[in-house]
Image (tube, grey):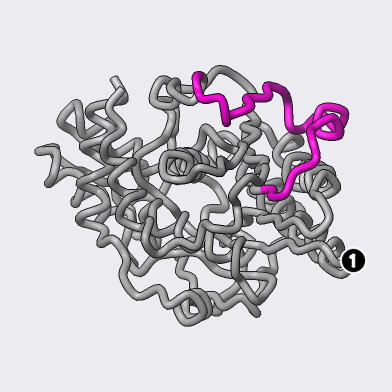
Amino acid sequence: MDNTIIENDILEIWDRLDVSEIEEKSITLTGGTGLIGTYFLFLFKRFNEVSENKVTVNLIVHNNLPEHLSEFESYSWVNIIRGDLSDVSFCEALPEVDYVIHAAGYGQPGRFLDNKTKTIRMNTITTDVLLSRLKKNGKALFVSSSEIYSGSDAIPYKETDYGCTTPQHPRACYIEGKRCGEAICAAYRENGVNVKVARVSLAYGPGVRADDKRVLYNFIQKGKAGKIELQDSGVAKRTYCYVSDTVEILWDILIKGNDFVYNVGGESHTTIYELAKLVGEKMGAVVSAPKDDNGLKGAPTDVFTNMEKAKTEFNKSNFVSLDVGIERTINWYKAVIK
């Protein structure tokens, strides 16, 4: 399996990462087969290639690894633990570790709407138990979502802003699950646990499963057939952040973040229709959109986070452009996803 694009992305950010403190340490990574988790795995792979003092990774998965991650089955520093993260007994049996990166939680709207109870459990009960498995003086990162701002008109959202949706909102399982997960992290932090919260907004890039139904990958899949048809008019706006930029910021938050909550997003503010047009141009596909809106119920009309805190604290000034990021994503997708 050719993962050159992912490996080159890691090399591109490598010199900007402070990785020295993880030597001979242990990390539990959830969501390791997802987009963000994939890049963390390749980051740890790079670390162990250049360091004599290896980091050990407990990779929590529910099923078999996707083909593009099959190489991690053979690495001695990867401890693959299969089980259901929504099962309290399974989580309580996990080993104590120096770092926890909790990136699981059904980021795809289609998946979290089909598994509402499990979505809530994975962001709440699972978060609680994972934090209890952290060694003294360890560090943890809870990957939350910009969806917690749902209902707010304060665009772009700052970390001090908050949403105002009800528990009956169509996407409440995800919104309130993440919000409660953050509250759990805050309680642990008050008790001296070094845990940070990252509100991720629309990360994209190589490293997804073939059944990922998020908008961009749906467009690429349709683009392979030569025609991209939108479900609605595509006027909703989104700010996409290429996954290497996302992981770079996440790592900085985990290792050296001074605050508790950070936004993690990009700079490319575009409509869904404009995104489809960009994919269509690169793939030679025709793009069409209906005049009526029939999209996912409760989906926000605009997602745009204020990134000044992270950019200032971590000296983050360069982001992969949407044009370049989409190009890399399409090239990876066409090579890997059949």
- The boundaries of the magenta stretch are 74-100
Residue 123 in sight in this render: yes
Three-letter amino acid code at the position of disc 1: Asn
The quarter of the displayed image where residue 146 is located: bottom right
Task: Tell me the element at label 1.
Answer: loop
Using the image, determine if residue 66 lies above or below residue 96.
above
- Magenta stretch: includes residue 83: yes
Write the residue at 19% across / 50% down.
277
Q: Which residue is mark 1?
A: 191
Q: Quadrant of the C terminus?
A: top left
* Residue 200 image point, x, y percent: 53, 58
Q: Is residue 6 above or below residue 23?
A: above
Residue 273 picture location, percent across and down: 27, 53
**Left or right: 183 with respect to 65?**
right
Q: Is residue 128 magenta?
A: no
Q: What percent of the width, then of the height, locates residue 204?
A: 39, 48
